[in-house]
Amino acid sequence: VNITTRAVTTTSDTFVLADAENKLITYSSTSATTITIPPESSVAFPVGSVINVIKIGASGTTTITQGAGVTISSAGATATAPALNGAFAAASCIKVATNTWYVVGKIA
């Protein structure tokens, strides 16, 4: 199965259900950007969903944040708000239970 891309050029983004369907989301803003993982009540991603993200802008930090009731676990400096810091830093957001996500990859 081939991956398709969704390009984001704004400074905020919230995942949608279609993002879990073999998608790579690219973030190119040179300003700080916030990605929100929405709660189950807003978007019912199946457990096991994987959303791949990559920062392609040369400056600015892209941070993945928790929607209301969502828990993110990561090895980032702030485990619940990992950041893609630098061009071509990438991560995968993996839904492991209702409102529970792991974020793994090149995060700060």
Image: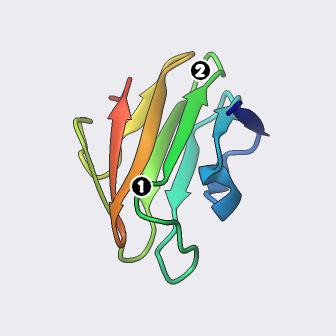
Occupied quadrant, residue 95 = bottom left
Residue furthest to the bottom: 41
Classify mark 1: helix, strand or loop.
loop
Q: Out of 25 and 12, give the one closest to the viewer.
A: 25
Residue 94 image label: none
Q: Position of residue 17 (x, y in %)?
A: 64, 63
Q: Which residue is mark 2?
A: 59
Q: Residue at x 22, y 36 (%)?
A: 75
Lower sequence index among marks 2 and 1: 1
Packing grade of label 2 (10 A; few <14, some 14-19, many >=20) is some
Alpha carbon of mark 2 to alpha carbon of mark 1: how far? 31 Å
Q: Nearer the viewer, mark 2 or mark 1?
A: 1
- According to the image, what is the colour scheme of the structure? rainbow
Task: Tell me the amino acid under the disc marked 2.
Answer: Ser
- Tell whether 81 sits left or right of 93: left
Q: Is residue 16 above or below residue 107?
A: below
Q: Residue 94: x and y, percent?
A: 40, 49
Q: Is residue 102 above or below residue 97?
A: above
Comparing 80 with 31, the one in front is 80
Please state, as top left, top right, bottom left or bottom right, where the C terminus lies in the image.
top left
Q: Of residues 18 and 54, which is closer to you in this image?
A: 18
Query: Residue 91: x percent and y percent?
Result: 45, 32
Query: Tag 2, which secondary structure?
Result: loop
Of residues 86 and 24, the one drawn nearer to the viewer in this rendering: 24
Instruction: Provide the residue designation for mark 1.
Output: 48
**Residue type, label 1:** Gly
What's the residue at 38%, 23% (across, down)? 106
Q: Position of residue 65 (x, y in %)?
A: 43, 55
Q: Residue at x 52, y 66 (%)?
A: 45
**Vertical relation: 108 (above or below) 23:** above
